[in-house]
Amino acid sequence: MLRAFIEENFADKKLIVITNREPYVHKKAGSGIKVEKPAGGVTSALDDVMRAVGGTWVAWGSGSSDREAVDGKDCIMVPPENPSYTLKRVWLSPTETDNYYHGYSNHLLWPLCHITLDRVYYRKRFWQDYKKVNQYFAAAVLKDADKNSIVWIHDFHLCLVPKMLREKEAGLTIAHFWHIPWPDWSVFRVCPQSKELLEGLLGNDLIGFQISLFVKNFMECVKESLDAEIDYNNSTIAYKGHITRLKAFPISIDYDKFNSMASSQQTEKVMENIRHKYKLNNSFIGIGVDRLEYTKALIKRLQAIDLFFERCERFRERFTFIQIAVPTRMKEPYISYKETVEGLITKINKKYSKGGWEPIIYIDRKVEHKYLAAYYRLADVAIISSVYDGMNLVAKEYAASQADENGALILSELAGAADELEGAILVNPYDIEGFSDSIKAALTLPKKEKAARMSLLRRQIEENDIFRWVINILREMLSVSSMKCEKCGYLFDRIDEIKDKLEGKKLLLFLDYDGTLTPIVESPDMAVIPDDMRSLLAELRRRLPIAVISGRSLEDIKKRVGIEGIIYAGNHGAEIWDGEKTIASQQSFVSRDLMQEFLNRLKESLSPINGVLIEDKGITASIHYRMVKERDLPKLFKTFTELSKDYKDSFRIVIGKKVFEIRPVDIWDKGDAVSWIIKNIGNGSAPIYIGDDATDEDAFKILRGKGINICIGGNAEAEYYLKNQKEVKDILQWLLKQQQ
Ligand code: GDG
């Protein structure tokens, strides 16, 4: 799926990925060199992308033999067994590593973004080297990049790179994925360089966050700190003439890999060995898998386990918790944290051990994935206790490994995964009593409920795996990139060109309604045309013909705009009002009864999901989901897609902004309506079309080369774009001036 997507879309693009850590490390091994591939879902998914695209991956050369392996340009082709893309290494001195990596990244940004403010430690030299190292990365990219390049940056080590790149090569498409949380302004303001970091990141065209809460927090920080224009409806920020899109892309894992590893015969054998080695027969088993990292809150987890054994004596000798803790960033405060965790484990083991049984088994080293799958599968419960977490992949890996659906997931409600997934037992890690009660609840969950929860979790992860995540981000990058290409230019940069095109011509103005004449709002009922926009339209109408073309019913759109003499098209062009009468109402072969049946079934199946709004417009219908919670979206998409299959011969589905439009296959679309209006009302005029939605593409296609196509936010079919809905008023005012 990923490969096909890339082959189809990336033929003429060059992809450059930048991460702090490299995907292949060369290390000294005796008298030779060995190549290691760090395990991790993200690195391996990105590696798959790069193998298919064949671009360049820029990263810090941190391995002991990395310098020996590269050519004169610091490059080496990887993977070693089948060289397909370039790994370009950036070199750091030990002091730069200390200041940029251990200092600014790990001592300041990491605890800041995880709201553990007492751990924030800042020195001026950290910042100086952070800037310097970001320059190194930017310089390495610029040597390879051209206007056609798409640059994909990762994480908090490289906040300044986007701006540095933008300043040197304005035409680049730059996207950033932020893997960790983004805190709110009351926290972020603690950073001495809050403004510089935000400015650095606003060099991006697109910033991806794990969940929409972090998008909201980022917008709030920009609002408080910079003089930027924020469009909260479209999640875009215009700053110093550049526009940045923000969007949530919850990261995921390779579901199939974990699911099949966990179901293999080899895993069954490994499980047997583990049971035997730790004498786990007849025991309930719990698992924790983490980097030995304070934000994962191992101490709170251990305190909850301690309290659980204190209160539930019957589980002593019957429940064993296995903690796999991989040492990470082995400097302070991690060294002390490790000691505290180990001290607490020793204390708990001393307190409850009996006969040969110990409540906690502690494994303080990395366990290979194929063995990890066995630990996951073995466990009746997994415990994730993060005090804050971007997503938490362990939660997803555990669920993907429950091939027999016999496991429960205890998940901190402060991890991004809790916002996205349904089916876990949520805990507040600060509430030790509640936490310990949840351990008991998980272990005593009725079998049926346990399986139902696990099956739900697994379905969500299967549908939204790491490959889907990569495709979603790449697709968004391509859309940003197509907006930037010559084909679709910013309208106010090309206003003279438009003036020339319209010189001496009679005009015919087409306008979409929602998102064009009104801002996008939560529910369609609330979309009211602002008074100043209505007066402007009325004024313009006195000078040139105007048609408003909307997805709403004809009656509704006429009422909402309410200006005499305007031509209206409703139901995406299926009904047209010429100022006196409805003149082009289409008869569809699809009966109204069939639409009613489809809507009744949708109503029933979607009723468990809060926030879905079904708008019946007679000939067509809209299913609005702007108010549906992010974690319910997979369920919504699945239900909708499955049900629609039964009607695919009769209805066409167009996906708009948080809405599914349902239309009989044979009725007119906006393109047909535009053609009819030009032929019958505005023959010989120069058409101008302004719209923002996917359904406007039908009109853009018809008008391409014949008129002026303007989209809001960017679209492959239009020649010009406006940055936001507010600019529609500016261009209408400009048009009015031209007519005076
Ligand atoms: C950051 C964000 C976000 C752990 N122990 C072993 C092992 N692991 C692997 C797990 C998992 C990964 O490490 C940990 O992923 P997390 O998501 O929990 O956390 P972070 O490392 O903090 O990652 C986080 C993530 O970025 C992705 O965007 O979810 O919120 O903080 O894949 O399997 N792997 C192996 N042996 C181990 O012993 N092989």
Image (cartoon, rainbow, N blue to C red):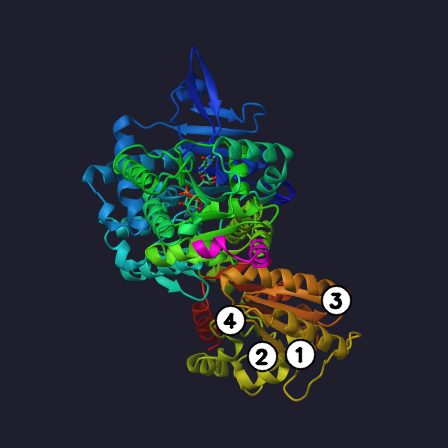
Which of the labelled discs sits on residue 545, or is there none? Answer: 2
Q: Earlier in the sequence, mark 1 or mark 3?
A: 3
The amino acid sitting under disc 3 is Tyr
The residue pinned by badge 1 equals 681
The residue pinned by badge 4 equals 516
Q: Main structural element of the magenta stretch: helix, strand or loop?
A: helix
Q: CA distance from mark 1 to mark 3?
A: 36 Å
Q: Earlier in the sequence, mark 4 or mark 1?
A: 4
Front position among marks 3 and 4: 3
Q: Which residues are magenta?
A: 440-454
250 in relation to 607, above or below: above
270 in relation to 241, above or below: above
The amino acid sitting under disc 2 is Pro
User: Is 448 within the magenta?
Assistant: yes
Closest to the observer, 611 or 493? 611
Q: Earlier in the sequence, mark 3 or mark 2?
A: 2
